[in-house]
């Protein structure tokens, strides 16, 4: 099992490197296509403003045979240059489409490998937890085994911390993003905002972010789970329904989640984190609030 996991981990690293290279290549191709398109646009404007002389005009205005050859050669060079620009625009457009398809396939492969590895890791930790709990139950009935029982309990506590730490390792943050925590905000609030910044502009996808924290698109509860996990406030992705009984009731001082069975959003230090905000500003963060009727307000303890 370890060999399989190691092989998948190596494959995932290779796919992630390929993903970065594909994105860089796509950026270069888009820049090339934009340059060719701009050149064609300028040539078209120039052609309307100052039309190229035809060959008859060139012959009539030439000041001799040498001048005629020079002007004819100039017209040929201009025609070749326009043909090259047109060819670059056409081929770069095809290359952008092909690279976009390759990038999409690589993203699908990367997501699949990440989910498989996360499921394998979760299963291994679940088995370990079950074995430790079974041993704890056996030792609890034997007074003479109290020392071993304490050891098992310590191992379980360490395993719970490991689960939380492993979950947080998949959370990227961006402390310099759009939303900023006010001065004096608790570290947990700063982490939640920084994690929200990291995915604020990613697209909406129903079920996105629920197979694992690391994803390429997120739905409402998936994105909020991601942000909260950065501060250890949740250990696994949650749907909007369970969030209705999560934490403590009512609005919090720093963080408040508003959820119902079909949708949820979150307010952190005056910023609303909501997938519906993507439609207007291209980011989940917004300073504008929305009605909360029909939503259950909850907050993490102490926040």
Image: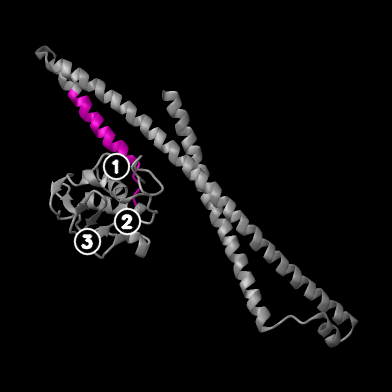
Instruction: Give the residue drawn at x 25%, y 25%.
Output: 129
Q: x, y percentage for residue 154?
A: 19, 26
Residue found at the very far right of the displayed protein: 65
Q: In the drawing, does residue 82 fall left or right of residue 163?
A: right
Q: Residue at label 3?
A: 270
Label whose residue precedes the other's in the sequence (1 or 2): 1
Instruction: Give the residue drawn at x 83%, y 87%.
Output: 61
Instruction: Give the residue drawn at x 18%, y 24%.
Output: 153
Q: In the drawing, does residue 219 fall left or right of residue 190?
A: right
Label whose residue precedes the other's in the sequence (2 or 3): 3
Q: Is residue 161 located in the magenta-colored stretch of the structure?
A: yes
Q: Name the chief secondary structure element in magenta.
A: helix
Instruction: Give the residue drawn at x 27%, y 37%.
Output: 164
* Residue 116 in view of the camera: yes
Q: Which residues are magenta?
A: 153-176
Q: Residue at label 1?
A: 237
Q: Is residue 289 located in the magenta-colored stretch of the structure?
A: no
């Amino acid at each position: 099992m370890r060999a399989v996991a190691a092989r998948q981990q190596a494959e995932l690293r290779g796919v992630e490197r390929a993903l970065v290279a594909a994105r860089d290549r796509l950026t270069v191709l888009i820049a090339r296509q934009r340059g060719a398109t701009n050149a064609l646009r300028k040539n078209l404007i120039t052609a309307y403003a100052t039309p190229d002389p035809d060959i008859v005009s060139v012959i009539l205005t030439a000041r001799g045979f040498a001048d005629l050859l020079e002007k004819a050669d100039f017209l040929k060079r201009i025609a070749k240059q326009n043909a090259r620009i047109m060819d670059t625009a056409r081929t770069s457009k095809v290359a952008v489409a092909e690279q976009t398809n390759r990038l999409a396939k690589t993203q699908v492969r990367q997501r699949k490998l990440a989910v498989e590895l996360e499921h394998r890791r979760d299963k291994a930790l679940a088995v370990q937890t079950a074995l430790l709990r079974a041993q704890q139950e056996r030792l609890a009935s034997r007074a003479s085994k109290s020392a071993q029982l304490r050891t098992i309990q310590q191992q379980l506590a360490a395993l719970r911390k490991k689960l939380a730490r492993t979950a947080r390792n998949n959370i990227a943050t961006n402390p310099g993003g759009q939303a900023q925590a006010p001065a004096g905000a608790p570290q947990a609030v700063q982490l939640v905002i920084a994690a929200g910044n990291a995915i604020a502009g990613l697209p909406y996808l129903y079920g996105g972010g629920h197979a694992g924290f690391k994803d390429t698109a997120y739905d409402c509860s998936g994105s909020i789970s991601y942000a909260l996990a950065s501060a250890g406030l949740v250990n696994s992705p949650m749907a909007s329904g369970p969030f209705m009984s999560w934490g403590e009731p009512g609005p919090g001082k720093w963080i408040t989640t508003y959820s119902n069975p079909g949708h949820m959003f979150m307010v952190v230090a005056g910023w609303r984190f909501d997938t519906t905000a993507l439609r207007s500003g291209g980011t989940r963060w917004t300073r504008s609030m929305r009605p909360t009727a029909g939503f259950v307000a909850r907050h993490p303890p102490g926040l």
